[in-house]
Amino acid sequence: MEKREQLYAGKAKSIFKTDDPDHLIMLFRNDTSAFDGKRIEQLDRKGMVNNKFNAFIMGKLQAAGIPTHFVKLLSDTEVLVKTMEMIPVECVVRNLAAGSLVRRLGVQEGLELNPPTFELFLKNDALGDPMVNESHVQSFGWATPEQLARMKELTFKINDILKALFAEGNMLLVDFKVEFGLHKGEVILGDEFSPDGCRLWDKDTREKLDKDRFRQNLGNVVESYEMVGQRLGLTF
Ligand code: UDP
């Protein structure tokens, strides 16, 4: 597989073409952003840790029947993925209240959400990723009703699989964001799953082990990401 020109650079990852139109290379950089890209810092080793963490999670999801764009690890910071047409909507599931839900509704952080909530956000940094609903998705043509139903079904399945996986490492999956796209007409999971896009708390102490350490200046960001991996049996 030959790496060709860069197609796109996001806040933490870059995408490159390959000599095969069906495959792309995703590069995990050390850049760490928060607040819709208003704050960006370099965190040593983060690209490598997130690449390996993502590969581990994508493998688990695929084994549990979730279709993903993941193909194989290429290097410490690069992964081969299937080319897909992204659906510009972020799917968020919450098991416990945190982050924007707490700010929006004034509820207590850690409030248990039963059943878990499902939220949609438009991917648009300039607008601050506004929350949207299923009707917006239809009216603006971001996804068909069938694709949206599949995204929702897969997001809840991912929640079930990963809640159980993180529980084995004595962690609570508080919430997470996933993104989907279309590959040969099929809705598949894209982007990444890492502590950059989810909230994970220690089950006993409720210590934050995810990107909130960066957002809230708690320190030891990459060290915590590595610890999360290690609790799942990963070595970096
Ligand atoms: N999230 C993300 N990218 C975004 C917005 C949110 O990965 O652009 C993740 C975030 O890490 C958390 C979940 O989605 O795990 C819910 O985020 P929330 O709506 O609480 O927003 P935040 O507090 O991050 O502004």
Image (tube, rainbow, N blue to C red):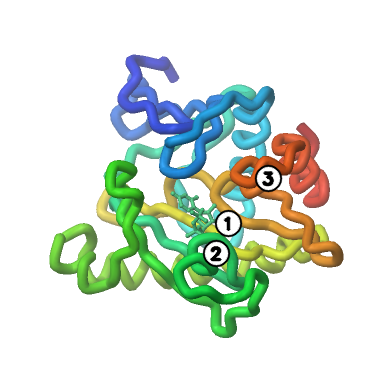
Mark 3: secondary structure: helix
Q: What amino acid is at disc 3?
A: Arg
Q: Earlier in the sequence, mark 2 or mark 3?
A: 2
Name the residue beneath numbered marker 3: 213
- Residue depicted at 21% across the width and 67% down the height: 136
Name the residue beneath numbered marker 1: 61
- Residue depicted at 55% across the width and 83% down the height: 115
x then y, percent, for residue 236: 76, 32
Which is more foreground, mark 2 or mark 3?
3
Disc 3: CA contacts within 10 A as few (<14), some (14-19) or many (>=20): some
Q: Is residue 38 left or right of residue 201?
A: left
Question: In the rendered image, is residue 130 in sight?
Answer: yes
x then y, percent, for residue 101: 50, 68
Q: Is residue 74 left or right of residue 154?
A: right
Which is more foreground, mark 1 or mark 3?
3
Name the residue beneath numbered marker 2: 158
Q: Nearer the viewer, residue 63 or 210?
A: 210
Q: Quadrant of residue 221?
A: top right
Mark 1: secondary structure: helix
Q: What amino acid is at disc 1?
A: Leu
Q: Earlier in the sequence, mark 1 or mark 3?
A: 1
- Residue depicted at 59% across the width and 62% down the height: 64
Question: In the rendered image, is residue 78 in sight?
Answer: no
Q: Nearer the viewer, residue 158 or 170?
A: 170
